[in-house]
Image (tube, rainbow, N blue to C red):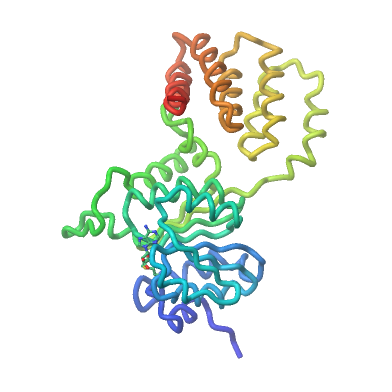
Protein backbone atom coordinates (compact mmCIF):
# COMPACT_ATOMS: atom_id res chain seq x y z
CA UNK A 1 0.00 0.00 0.00
CA UNK A 2 1.33 3.44 -0.92
CA UNK A 3 1.79 5.77 2.06
CA UNK A 4 -0.30 8.96 2.12
CA UNK A 5 1.45 12.12 1.06
CA UNK A 6 1.43 15.17 3.35
CA UNK A 7 -1.62 16.73 1.70
CA UNK A 8 -3.60 13.53 2.08
CA UNK A 9 -2.52 13.27 5.72
CA UNK A 10 -3.65 16.88 6.18
CA UNK A 11 -7.06 16.24 4.63
CA UNK A 12 -7.63 13.22 6.87
CA UNK A 13 -6.44 15.12 9.96
CA UNK A 14 -8.69 18.09 9.10
CA UNK A 15 -6.14 20.92 9.02
CA UNK A 16 -6.86 23.96 6.85
CA UNK A 17 -3.31 23.76 5.48
CA UNK A 18 -4.49 21.08 3.03
CA UNK A 19 -5.49 21.58 -0.62
CA UNK A 20 -9.12 21.86 0.49
CA UNK A 21 -8.24 25.29 1.98
CA UNK A 22 -4.85 27.04 2.06
CA UNK A 23 -3.03 24.50 -0.09
CA UNK A 24 0.38 24.75 1.61
CA UNK A 25 1.05 21.05 2.01
CA UNK A 26 2.21 20.12 -1.50
CA UNK A 27 5.02 22.65 -0.92
CA UNK A 28 5.78 21.55 2.64
CA UNK A 29 5.95 17.89 1.54
CA UNK A 30 8.96 18.74 -0.59
CA UNK A 31 10.46 21.13 1.98
CA UNK A 32 10.32 18.59 4.80
CA UNK A 33 11.28 15.46 2.81
CA UNK A 34 14.77 15.35 4.32
CA UNK A 35 13.40 15.39 7.89
CA UNK A 36 10.72 12.70 7.53
CA UNK A 37 12.57 9.90 9.31
CA UNK A 38 14.90 11.95 11.50
CA UNK A 39 14.59 12.25 15.28
CA UNK A 40 14.11 16.01 15.12
CA UNK A 41 12.11 18.49 17.22
CA UNK A 42 9.26 20.27 15.41
CA UNK A 43 7.45 23.30 16.85
CA UNK A 44 4.07 24.51 15.67
CA UNK A 45 2.64 27.69 17.16
CA UNK A 46 -1.16 27.38 17.09
CA UNK A 47 -2.80 24.07 18.02
CA UNK A 48 -6.57 24.82 18.00
CA UNK A 49 -8.22 21.41 17.39
CA UNK A 50 -4.94 19.50 17.25
CA UNK A 51 -5.47 18.72 13.53
CA UNK A 52 -2.03 19.74 12.29
CA UNK A 53 -0.30 18.11 15.28
CA UNK A 54 -1.95 14.80 14.29
CA UNK A 55 -0.74 15.30 10.74
CA UNK A 56 2.84 16.18 11.72
CA UNK A 57 3.01 13.15 14.00
CA UNK A 58 2.13 10.87 11.10
CA UNK A 59 4.43 12.64 8.64
CA UNK A 60 7.54 13.08 10.86
CA UNK A 61 7.77 9.47 11.89
CA UNK A 62 10.53 9.81 14.48
CA UNK A 63 10.12 13.41 15.59
CA UNK A 64 8.97 15.07 18.79
CA UNK A 65 6.15 17.45 17.88
CA UNK A 66 5.68 20.43 20.19
CA UNK A 67 2.55 22.59 19.93
CA UNK A 68 2.27 26.00 21.61
CA UNK A 69 -1.13 27.59 22.19
CA UNK A 70 -2.75 30.15 24.45
CA UNK A 71 -5.66 27.89 25.26
CA UNK A 72 -5.28 25.24 28.00
CA UNK A 73 -7.98 23.26 26.16
CA UNK A 74 -5.25 22.23 23.73
CA UNK A 75 -3.59 20.08 26.41
CA UNK A 76 -6.02 17.31 25.44
CA UNK A 77 -4.09 16.83 22.17
CA UNK A 78 -0.97 15.50 23.89
CA UNK A 79 -0.08 11.93 22.98
CA UNK A 80 3.00 9.85 22.38
CA UNK A 81 5.65 12.08 20.69
CA UNK A 82 3.29 15.10 20.91
CA UNK A 83 3.82 17.73 23.62
CA UNK A 84 1.54 20.73 24.09
CA UNK A 85 2.81 23.82 25.92
CA UNK A 86 0.50 26.61 27.03
CA UNK A 87 1.61 30.22 26.63
CA UNK A 88 1.73 33.16 24.26
CA UNK A 89 4.10 33.51 21.34
CA UNK A 90 4.81 37.11 22.33
CA UNK A 91 6.05 36.09 25.78
CA UNK A 92 9.87 36.00 25.75
CA UNK A 93 9.91 33.73 28.83
CA UNK A 94 7.69 31.16 27.08
CA UNK A 95 9.91 31.17 23.97
CA UNK A 96 13.12 30.94 26.01
CA UNK A 97 11.69 28.02 27.96
CA UNK A 98 10.77 26.18 24.75
CA UNK A 99 14.27 26.68 23.37
CA UNK A 100 15.88 25.49 26.60
CA UNK A 101 13.97 22.20 26.37
CA UNK A 102 14.23 21.57 22.60
CA UNK A 103 16.43 22.31 19.62
CA UNK A 104 14.08 22.72 16.71
CA UNK A 105 14.78 21.81 13.09
CA UNK A 106 11.32 22.94 12.00
CA UNK A 107 9.22 25.84 13.30
CA UNK A 108 5.78 26.72 11.92
CA UNK A 109 4.04 29.93 12.97
CA UNK A 110 0.28 29.39 12.64
CA UNK A 111 -0.61 31.18 15.87
CA UNK A 112 -2.14 34.60 16.50
CA UNK A 113 -1.15 35.99 13.05
CA UNK A 114 -0.84 39.39 14.72
CA UNK A 115 1.84 41.25 12.76
CA UNK A 116 3.92 42.27 15.78
CA UNK A 117 3.73 38.71 17.20
CA UNK A 118 4.87 37.16 13.92
CA UNK A 119 7.93 39.44 13.67
CA UNK A 120 8.77 39.15 17.38
CA UNK A 121 8.53 35.34 17.34
CA UNK A 122 10.60 35.05 14.16
CA UNK A 123 13.36 37.26 15.54
CA UNK A 124 13.42 35.29 18.80
CA UNK A 125 13.14 31.76 17.44
CA UNK A 126 15.05 31.85 14.15
CA UNK A 127 18.40 32.24 15.97
CA UNK A 128 17.56 29.11 18.00
CA UNK A 129 16.73 27.02 14.91
CA UNK A 130 19.31 24.35 14.06
CA UNK A 131 21.53 25.03 11.01
CA UNK A 132 19.76 23.72 7.90
CA UNK A 133 16.41 24.11 9.69
CA UNK A 134 13.21 25.57 8.26
CA UNK A 135 10.96 28.33 9.62
CA UNK A 136 7.49 28.78 8.13
CA UNK A 137 5.26 31.81 8.48
CA UNK A 138 1.69 31.06 7.45
CA UNK A 139 -1.33 33.13 6.51
CA UNK A 140 0.47 36.18 5.19
CA UNK A 141 -2.57 37.09 3.10
CA UNK A 142 -4.21 38.64 6.15
CA UNK A 143 -1.40 41.22 6.37
CA UNK A 144 -2.28 42.86 3.06
CA UNK A 145 -4.75 45.68 2.88
CA UNK A 146 -6.88 44.04 0.20
CA UNK A 147 -10.57 44.83 0.50
CA UNK A 148 -10.09 45.94 4.10
CA UNK A 149 -8.51 42.59 4.82
CA UNK A 150 -6.05 43.72 7.53
CA UNK A 151 -7.59 41.05 9.71
CA UNK A 152 -5.33 41.36 12.73
CA UNK A 153 -4.47 45.04 12.38
CA UNK A 154 -1.61 46.58 10.40
CA UNK A 155 0.75 46.71 13.41
CA UNK A 156 3.91 48.78 13.59
CA UNK A 157 6.03 45.70 12.79
CA UNK A 158 4.92 44.07 9.59
CA UNK A 159 5.91 40.54 8.52
CA UNK A 160 5.49 41.67 4.91
CA UNK A 161 7.97 44.52 5.41
CA UNK A 162 10.44 42.22 7.24
CA UNK A 163 10.27 39.46 4.64
CA UNK A 164 10.50 41.96 1.79
CA UNK A 165 13.59 43.54 3.30
CA UNK A 166 15.25 40.17 3.84
CA UNK A 167 14.38 39.13 0.27
CA UNK A 168 15.86 42.35 -1.11
CA UNK A 169 19.05 41.70 0.87
CA UNK A 170 19.24 38.15 -0.48
CA UNK A 171 18.69 39.27 -4.07
CA UNK A 172 21.27 42.03 -3.86
CA UNK A 173 23.67 39.96 -1.77
CA UNK A 174 24.24 42.91 0.53
CA UNK A 175 22.85 44.58 3.59
CA UNK A 176 22.79 48.32 4.00
CA UNK A 177 25.49 49.40 6.43
CA UNK A 178 22.92 51.27 8.51
CA UNK A 179 21.07 47.96 9.06
CA UNK A 180 24.13 45.79 9.54
CA UNK A 181 23.95 45.13 13.26
CA UNK A 182 21.96 43.15 15.80
CA UNK A 183 19.23 40.79 14.61
CA UNK A 184 19.16 42.21 11.04
CA UNK A 185 22.84 41.37 10.61
CA UNK A 186 22.29 37.95 12.15
CA UNK A 187 19.38 37.19 9.80
CA UNK A 188 21.29 38.42 6.75
CA UNK A 189 24.19 36.14 7.58
CA UNK A 190 22.23 33.08 8.58
CA UNK A 191 19.27 32.92 6.17
CA UNK A 192 20.01 30.64 3.25
CA UNK A 193 16.82 31.14 1.28
CA UNK A 194 13.32 32.59 1.39
CA UNK A 195 10.72 30.73 -0.64
CA UNK A 196 7.39 32.44 -1.15
CA UNK A 197 4.30 30.38 -1.85
CA UNK A 198 0.74 31.59 -2.05
CA UNK A 199 0.04 32.98 1.42
CA UNK A 200 3.15 31.72 3.25
CA UNK A 201 6.94 32.04 3.47
CA UNK A 202 9.44 29.21 3.91
CA UNK A 203 12.71 30.48 5.36
CA UNK A 204 15.67 28.13 5.46
CA UNK A 205 18.68 28.55 7.71
CA UNK A 206 22.18 28.03 6.38
CA UNK A 207 23.93 24.75 6.98
CA UNK A 208 27.22 24.90 8.78
CA UNK A 209 29.55 24.47 5.84
CA UNK A 210 32.16 22.56 7.76
CA UNK A 211 32.88 21.43 11.24
CA UNK A 212 34.69 24.58 12.24
CA UNK A 213 35.93 23.24 15.55
CA UNK A 214 37.65 20.29 13.80
CA UNK A 215 39.21 22.33 11.03
CA UNK A 216 40.16 25.32 13.10
CA UNK A 217 43.69 24.18 13.84
CA UNK A 218 44.31 23.65 10.15
CA UNK A 219 43.00 27.12 9.35
CA UNK A 220 45.10 28.66 12.09
CA UNK A 221 48.18 26.76 10.89
CA UNK A 222 47.59 28.20 7.46
CA UNK A 223 47.44 31.67 8.89
CA UNK A 224 50.38 31.31 11.27
CA UNK A 225 52.98 33.81 10.29
CA UNK A 226 50.49 35.57 8.03
CA UNK A 227 51.38 39.22 8.18
CA UNK A 228 48.15 40.35 6.56
CA UNK A 229 45.68 41.59 9.15
CA UNK A 230 42.78 41.14 6.70
CA UNK A 231 43.41 37.37 6.70
CA UNK A 232 42.75 37.29 10.47
CA UNK A 233 39.78 39.60 9.97
CA UNK A 234 38.26 37.24 7.40
CA UNK A 235 38.79 34.28 9.71
CA UNK A 236 37.06 36.16 12.52
CA UNK A 237 34.07 37.05 10.28
CA UNK A 238 33.87 33.48 9.06
CA UNK A 239 33.83 32.06 12.58
CA UNK A 240 31.18 34.55 13.64
CA UNK A 241 29.03 33.59 10.68
CA UNK A 242 29.42 29.89 11.53
CA UNK A 243 28.39 30.55 15.12
CA UNK A 244 31.79 30.01 16.68
CA UNK A 245 33.88 29.08 18.44
CA UNK A 246 33.49 32.72 19.50
CA UNK A 247 36.71 32.73 21.56
CA UNK A 248 38.60 31.92 18.35
CA UNK A 249 36.71 34.63 16.47
CA UNK A 250 37.79 37.08 19.18
CA UNK A 251 41.39 35.88 19.04
CA UNK A 252 41.47 36.25 15.25
CA UNK A 253 40.10 39.82 15.42
CA UNK A 254 42.67 40.73 18.08
CA UNK A 255 45.45 39.24 15.93
CA UNK A 256 44.31 41.49 13.07
CA UNK A 257 44.46 44.53 15.37
CA UNK A 258 47.89 43.51 16.66
CA UNK A 259 49.18 43.50 13.09
CA UNK A 260 47.73 46.90 12.26
CA UNK A 261 46.18 49.01 14.99
CA UNK A 262 45.08 51.76 12.58
CA UNK A 263 42.46 49.80 10.61
CA UNK A 264 38.94 50.56 11.96
CA UNK A 265 37.36 47.52 10.31
CA UNK A 266 39.06 45.15 12.76
CA UNK A 267 37.78 47.01 15.83
CA UNK A 268 34.34 46.94 14.20
CA UNK A 269 34.66 43.16 13.72
CA UNK A 270 35.85 42.67 17.31
CA UNK A 271 32.85 44.68 18.47
CA UNK A 272 30.48 42.25 16.66
CA UNK A 273 32.21 39.27 18.27
CA UNK A 274 32.07 40.74 21.78
CA UNK A 275 28.41 41.65 21.29
CA UNK A 276 27.63 38.06 20.30
CA UNK A 277 29.55 36.90 23.41
CA UNK A 278 27.32 39.10 25.57
CA UNK A 279 30.09 41.62 26.45
CA UNK A 280 28.19 44.79 25.48
CA UNK A 281 30.60 47.13 27.31
CA UNK A 282 33.63 45.59 25.58
CA UNK A 283 31.79 45.81 22.25
CA UNK A 284 31.08 49.52 22.82
CA UNK A 285 34.76 50.23 23.53
CA UNK A 286 35.87 48.54 20.31
CA UNK A 287 33.06 50.18 18.36
CA UNK A 288 34.13 53.64 19.62
CA UNK A 289 37.67 52.98 18.36
CA UNK A 290 36.30 51.95 14.95
CA UNK A 291 34.17 55.10 14.74
CA UNK A 292 37.05 57.38 15.77
CA UNK A 293 39.44 55.88 13.22
CA UNK A 294 36.83 55.85 10.42
CA UNK A 295 35.83 59.50 10.71
CA UNK A 296 35.61 61.08 7.25
CA UNK A 297 35.59 57.73 5.40
CA UNK A 298 32.70 55.96 3.63
CA UNK A 299 32.68 53.25 6.30
CA UNK A 300 31.88 55.73 9.08
CA UNK A 301 28.07 55.52 8.73
CA UNK A 302 27.99 51.74 9.21
CA UNK A 303 30.36 51.77 12.18
CA UNK A 304 28.38 54.57 13.82
CA UNK A 305 25.15 52.59 13.33
CA UNK A 306 26.69 49.64 15.24
CA UNK A 307 27.80 51.99 18.05
CA UNK A 308 24.34 53.58 18.29
CA UNK A 309 22.78 50.12 18.36
CA UNK A 310 25.11 49.01 21.20
CA UNK A 311 24.44 52.18 23.17
CA UNK A 312 20.71 51.42 22.71
CA UNK A 313 21.19 47.96 24.27
CA UNK A 314 23.21 49.39 27.11
CA UNK A 315 20.70 51.99 28.41
C1 LIG B 1 -5.16 28.86 13.02
S1 LIG B 1 -5.30 28.15 14.59
C2 LIG B 1 -4.13 26.84 14.50
C3 LIG B 1 -4.52 25.74 13.59
C4 LIG B 1 -3.63 24.53 13.60
N1 LIG B 1 -2.24 24.86 13.41
C5 LIG B 1 -4.03 23.56 12.49
O1 LIG B 1 -3.55 23.72 11.35
O2 LIG B 1 -4.80 22.65 12.79
C6 LIG B 1 -4.56 29.37 15.59
C7 LIG B 1 -4.36 29.01 17.05
O3 LIG B 1 -3.46 29.98 17.58
C8 LIG B 1 -3.76 30.19 18.93
N2 LIG B 1 -3.22 31.49 19.36
C9 LIG B 1 -3.77 32.72 19.24
N3 LIG B 1 -2.98 33.66 19.77
C10 LIG B 1 -1.88 33.00 20.25
C11 LIG B 1 -0.70 33.43 20.91
N4 LIG B 1 -0.48 34.72 21.19
N5 LIG B 1 0.22 32.50 21.25
C12 LIG B 1 0.02 31.19 20.99
N6 LIG B 1 -1.10 30.74 20.35
C13 LIG B 1 -2.03 31.62 19.98
C14 LIG B 1 -5.27 30.13 18.98
O4 LIG B 1 -5.69 29.78 20.30
C15 LIG B 1 -5.59 29.06 17.94
O5 LIG B 1 -5.78 27.80 18.57
Q: Is residue 309 above or below residue 89?
A: above
Residue 260, image quadrant: top right
Left or right, 21 with reference to 308 = left
Specify the quarter for ligand 1.
Answer: bottom left
Looking at this rendering, what residue extends furthest in the left direction?
147
Count of numbered badges drawn on the protein:
0
Residue 236 percent coordinates (x, y): 66, 28
Looking at this rendering, what residue extends furthest in the front direction?
72
Residue positioned 45% across, 56% down in the render = 195
Left or right, 200 with reference to 100 = left
Residue positioned 55% across, 16% down in the render = 285
Residue 70 percent coordinates (x, y): 39, 62
Residue 290 percent coordinates (x, y): 53, 15
The N terminus - image quarter: bottom right
Q: Is residue 176 above or below residue 150?
A: above
Residue positioned 36% across, 70% down in the render = 22
Residue 3, image quadrant: bottom right
Residue 32 percent coordinates (x, y): 56, 66
- Nearest the viewer among 232 and 151 is 151
- Nearest the viewer among 100 and 121 is 100
Residue positioned 50% across, 77% down in the render = 54
The C terminus - image quarter: top left
Left or right, 103 with reference to 21 = right
Left or right, 150 with reference to 169 = left
Amino acid sequence: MQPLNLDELGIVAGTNKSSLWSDYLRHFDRTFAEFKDKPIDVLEIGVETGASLRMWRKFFRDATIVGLDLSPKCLQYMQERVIVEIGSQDDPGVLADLCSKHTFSVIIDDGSHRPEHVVFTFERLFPALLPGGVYIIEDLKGHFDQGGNFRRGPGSLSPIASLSKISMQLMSGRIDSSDNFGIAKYLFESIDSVELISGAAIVRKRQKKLNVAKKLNAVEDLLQGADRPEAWGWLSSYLLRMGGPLEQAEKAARNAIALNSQLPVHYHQLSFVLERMGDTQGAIEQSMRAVALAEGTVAYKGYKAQLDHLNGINV
